């Protein structure tokens, strides 16, 4: 359909995204498609003709937030029945018709494998006046090939306005997950693991770099498991993708998230070591520091395997920053198993850890097999305690940077800075080091998108505070 901007007012689209970077990317692609249909973005929900929620189902809390948001916008639909409301993403795939039962004012429910159809589904719902549901097959609903085919890949359309910043972009290298960790809903809602063809990934990266993107983050649920076999038998691994993307003229930094411990191969670590543009940062969740818990989680490694992997990472890539995820209060986690996790965090010295309280998910093996037997207050306490241990380590390690100069890719205005009219002076900027540490410093807007040297003056557990050397300030002012 052609752009309708000349013939009628553009339809206004409001979109809210929760969850992981995959969802951020999915929203970008959905918005790109809808823009082609004459939509424009609005940040005012009351002005919108179409309201979309791109949802997450990894924890109950994320779902509750969406159901209450849907409750809050009931009045909009009552006042203006022509407004379309959509629930997209993982919760759509997980809850399916349940969403329409709980929120009958919803017009479209679209799983992550069906997002390319959002424009048609919105149009169809309007045309026939009844809700439209588009989800992929359940993981036990047929052969692997049929299920895989029901999760369509679509990554061609890009929408610069939806990116983290104009020069940062995500590129999906894999879809789905086959690990089936017992607590995790992702393999059910995002389908079987599929690696995208390298030509498609390279093509997309080239397009983004041509548009001025300087930092590309490759995305996959287990990104380091990436492997693509060409019909002639040639194999492309993540390390190959990194070197090919690093060769694109104009690119400044490449990252990849999230890694799985068992697939941390030497070729990948060597690529991170040898490619100056590769971020020296690897997110590789441990989830627990107790072998018995890891076994129940079906993580397929032991604590000592994980620590050997860490040692190998640090030996191969000096200065690499490693971050982790942990689930506290998983089924059967005793005080002793939790203590083991605390000790792993103390030994591992992660740059940071994302810590979550176990949230049972219907449809997962853990929910079926094990009782959720750790009390909420205990989960909360363990979460706080582990976070305190990690924060003390992050602070200590960040303070080591004081007095050093670091290379920072400048991302934009620091979030705490308020927007000023006609802003062109010196302000608080934020960026990241190659090892993914956030650096806040005073500088000019025109530094955004550039790699500069910053001298670290102070540090908190999450931020380095720096100063731009005078040469850069002068250069920035011209
Ligand atoms: N409960 C709590 N945290 C979970 N995660 C995944 N599933 C659950 C769950 N059921 C966490 C894991 C994963 C991160 C993205 O979310 O730590 O690495
Ligand atoms: Fe979930 Fe495990 Fe797959 Fe990560 S590796 S998405 S935690 S099943």
Image (tube, helix red, strand yellow):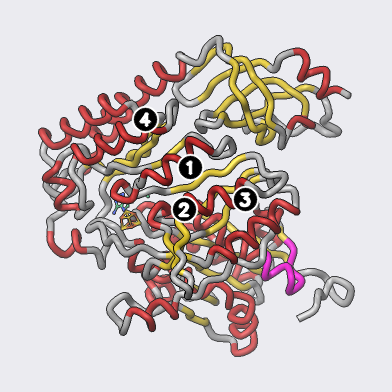
In the image shown, does 150 or 34 lie closer to the viewer?
A: 150
**Observer-nearest residue: 191 or 31?**
191
CB of mark 1 within 8 Å of CB of mark 2? yes
| Circles 3, 2 touching at the beta carbon (< 8 Å) | no
- Range of magenta residues: 32-40
Q: Which mark is residue 314?
A: 4
User: Label 2: how many residues lie within 10 Å, few (<14), some (14-19) or many (20+)?
Assistant: many
The first of marks 1 and 3 along the sequence is 3
Which quadrant of the structure image shows residue 367? bottom left
Q: Which residue is mark 2?
A: 238
Which is nearer the eye, 8 or 432? 432
First in residue order: circle 1 vs circle 2: 2
Q: CA distance from mark 1 to mark 3?
A: 21 Å
**Disc marking residue 169:** 3
Q: x, y percentage for residue 172?
A: 53, 59
Q: State the quadrant of the N terminus.
A: bottom right
Residue at the (80%, 78%) spot, across then down: 2
């Amino acid at each position: 359909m052609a752009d309708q901007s000349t013939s009628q007012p553009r339809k206004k689209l409001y979109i809210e995204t929760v969850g992981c970077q995959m969802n951020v990317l999915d929203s970008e692609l959905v918005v790109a498609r809808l823009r082609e249909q004459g939509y424009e973005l609005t940040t005012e929900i009351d002005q919108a003709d179409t309201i979309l929620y791109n949802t997450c189902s990894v924890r109950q809390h994320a779902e509750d937030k969406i159901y209450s948001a849907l409750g809050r916008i009931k009045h909009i639909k009552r006042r203006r029945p022509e407004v379309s409301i959509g629930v997209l993403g993982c919760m759509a795939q997980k809850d399916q018709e349940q969403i329409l039962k709980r929120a009958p004012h919803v017009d479209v429910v679209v799983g992550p494998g069906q997002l390319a159809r959002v424009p048609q589904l919105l149009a169809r719902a309007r045309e026939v006046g009844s809700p439209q549901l588009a989800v992929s097959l359940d993981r036990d609903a047929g052969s692997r090939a049929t299920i895989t085919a029901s999760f369509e890949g679509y990554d061609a359309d890009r929408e610069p306005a939806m990116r983290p910043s104009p020069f940062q972009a995500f590129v999906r290298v894999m879809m789905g997950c086959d690990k089936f960790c017992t607590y995790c809903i992702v393999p059910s809602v995002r389908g079987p693991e599929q690696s995208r063809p390298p030509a498609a990934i390279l093509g997309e990266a080239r397009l983004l770099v041509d548009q001025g993107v300087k930092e590309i983050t490759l995305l996959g649920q287990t990104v380091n498991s990436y492997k693509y076999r060409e019909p002639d038998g040639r194999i492309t691994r993540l390390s190959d993708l990194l070197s090919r993307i690093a060769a694109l003229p104009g690119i400044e930094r490449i990252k990849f998230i999230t890694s799985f411990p068992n697939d941390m191969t030497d070729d990948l670590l060597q690529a991170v070591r040898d490619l100056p543009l590769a971020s020296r940062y690897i997110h590789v969740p441990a989830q627990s520091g107790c072998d018995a818990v890891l076994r129940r989680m079906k993580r397929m490694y032991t604590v000592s395997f994980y620590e050997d992997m860490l040692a190998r990472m640090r030996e191969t890539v000096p200065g690499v920053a490693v971050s982790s995820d942990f689930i506290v209060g998983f089924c059967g986690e005793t005080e002793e198993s939790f203590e083991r996790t605390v000790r792993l965090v103390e030994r591992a010295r992660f740059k940071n850890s994302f810590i979550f309280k176990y949230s049972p998910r219907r449809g997962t093996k853990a929910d079926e097999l094990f009782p959720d037997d750790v009390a909420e207050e205990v989960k909360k306490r363990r979460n706080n305690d582990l976070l305190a241990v990690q924060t003390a380590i992050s602070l200590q390690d960040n303070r080591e940077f004081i007095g050093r100069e670091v290379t920072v890719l400048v991302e934009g205005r620091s979030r705490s800075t308020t927007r000023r009219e006609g802003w062109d002076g010196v302000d608080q900027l934020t960026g990241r080091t190659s090892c993914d540490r956030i650096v806040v410093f005073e500088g000019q807007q025109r530094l955004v998108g550039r790699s500069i040297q910053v001298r670290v003056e102070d540090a908190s557990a999450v931020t380095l505070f720096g100063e731009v050397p005078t040469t850069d300030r002068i250069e920035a002012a011209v």
